[in-house]
Image (tube, rainbow, N blue to C red):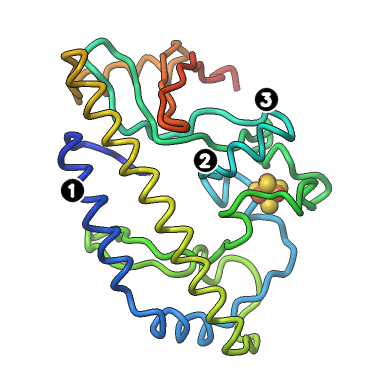
């Protein structure tokens, strides 16, 4: 689980640093890994379930597309980045909702019902390029999600396709970090103007209440603004 336990300035500096490292990441190295792994989708549809993939994060353009299909299918993305002293949470974007069985709202009979209009991350999965800490806390690049847990391997992916995948994934990760940086910059100003501050103790307290079924307020960053939502977790099951 992602945990944000740092101030806005620290989160901003980490995001900017990762964006710079991402730009510097050699595309040839990424292409080599894509070719060596040779991932091939076997249509198991597990990547469209919460058990396998925690949530489907939406870039702003994805949110706009999904809102046109059905605005009721989105919700504030989980793992809110900030919480002010009044107990209001802040997050950098939306995510797709899941059904009670944990599968994506758009999954039916193991097929995506919005395939031609599916979000960016669904088009690129399982490829990724971001820094992540392992169980020992060592931070390193991850390029392929769920390795050896789904799909087939050692398929022959030609060089041109490897190049396209590498470049599209880098562009996606860059947009993701840019959205996060824009969110943090907006939050920094929002907090300063209103004399708010991120308080981890309040974050933890409100999360405990939320996990027991309490309501919380979450402001979602979208198109340069914060959109307020009231969120309640279904703890009946
Ligand atoms: S939008 Fe489609 S591809 Fe993406 S998780 Fe949902 S069902 Fe799967």
Camera-side residue: 216 or 63? Answer: 63
Classify 191 as above or below 175: above
Camera-side residue: 228 or 192? Answer: 192
In percent of the image, x 22 and y 29: which residue is there? 188
In percent of the image, x 41 and y 23: which residue is there? 226
Mark 3 lies on a secondary structure that is: helix
How far from the left and from the top, in percent, is residue 160? 59, 86
Mark 1 lies on a secondary structure that is: helix
Circles 2 and 3, Cβ within 8 Å, touching? The answer is no
The CA span between labels 1 and 3 is 34 Å
Classify 159 as above or below 14: below
Q: Quadrant of the C terminus?
A: top right
Name the disc covering residue 72, or none: 3
Q: Is mark 3 within 8 Å of ligand 1?
A: no
Tell me the crowding category of disc 3: few under 14, some 14 to 19, or many 20 or more residues within 10 angstroms, Cα based: few
Q: Nearer the viewer, mark 2 or mark 1?
A: 2
Name the disc covering residue 13, or none: 1
Q: Quadrant of residue 12?
A: top left
Dot 2 or dot 1: first in sequence order is 1
The CA span between labels 2 and 3 is 16 Å
Specify whether 39 is left or right of 94.
right
Specify whether 90 is left or right of 11.
right
Classify 104 as above or below 195: below
To which residue does mark 2 refer?
A: 60
How far from the left and from the top, in percent, is residue 90? 35, 26
Dot 1 or dot 3: first in sequence order is 1
In percent of the image, x 68 and y 42: which residue is there? 103
How far from the left and from the top, in percent, is residue 220? 44, 27
For the view shown, which residue lies furthest in the right direction?
109
Circles 1 and 3, Cβ within 8 Å, touching? The answer is no
């Amino acid at each position: 689980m992602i945990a944000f336990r740092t101030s806005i300035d620290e989160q901003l500096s980490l995001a900017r640093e990762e964006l710079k490292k991402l730009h510097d990441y050699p595309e040839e190295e990424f292409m080599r890994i894509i070719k060596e792994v040779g991932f091939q989708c076997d249509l198991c549809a597990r990547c469209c379930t919460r058990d396998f993939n925690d949530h489907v994060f939406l870039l702003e353009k994805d949110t706009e597309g999904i809102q046109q299909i059905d605005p009721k299918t989105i919700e504030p993305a989980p793992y809110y980045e900030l919480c002010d002293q009044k107990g209001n949470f802040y997050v950098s974007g939306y995510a797709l909702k899941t059904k009670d069985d944990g599968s994506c709202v758009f999954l039916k009979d193991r097929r995506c019902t919005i395939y031609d209009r599916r979000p960016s991350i669904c088009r690129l999965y399982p490829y990724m390029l971001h820094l992540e800490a392992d169980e020992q806390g060592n931070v390193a690049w991850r390029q392929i999600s769920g390795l050896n847990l789904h799909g087939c391997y050692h398929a022959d992916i030609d060089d041109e396709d490897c190049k396209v995948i590498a470049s599209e994934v880098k562009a996606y990760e860059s947009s993701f970090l840019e959205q996060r940086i824009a969110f943090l910059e907006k939050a920094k100003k929002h907090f300063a103007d209103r004399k708010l501050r991120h308080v981890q103790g309040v974050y933890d307290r409100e999360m405990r209440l939320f996990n027991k079924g309490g309501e919380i307020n979450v402001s979602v960053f979208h198109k340069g603004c914060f959109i307020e939502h009231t969120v309640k977790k279904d703890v009946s099951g």
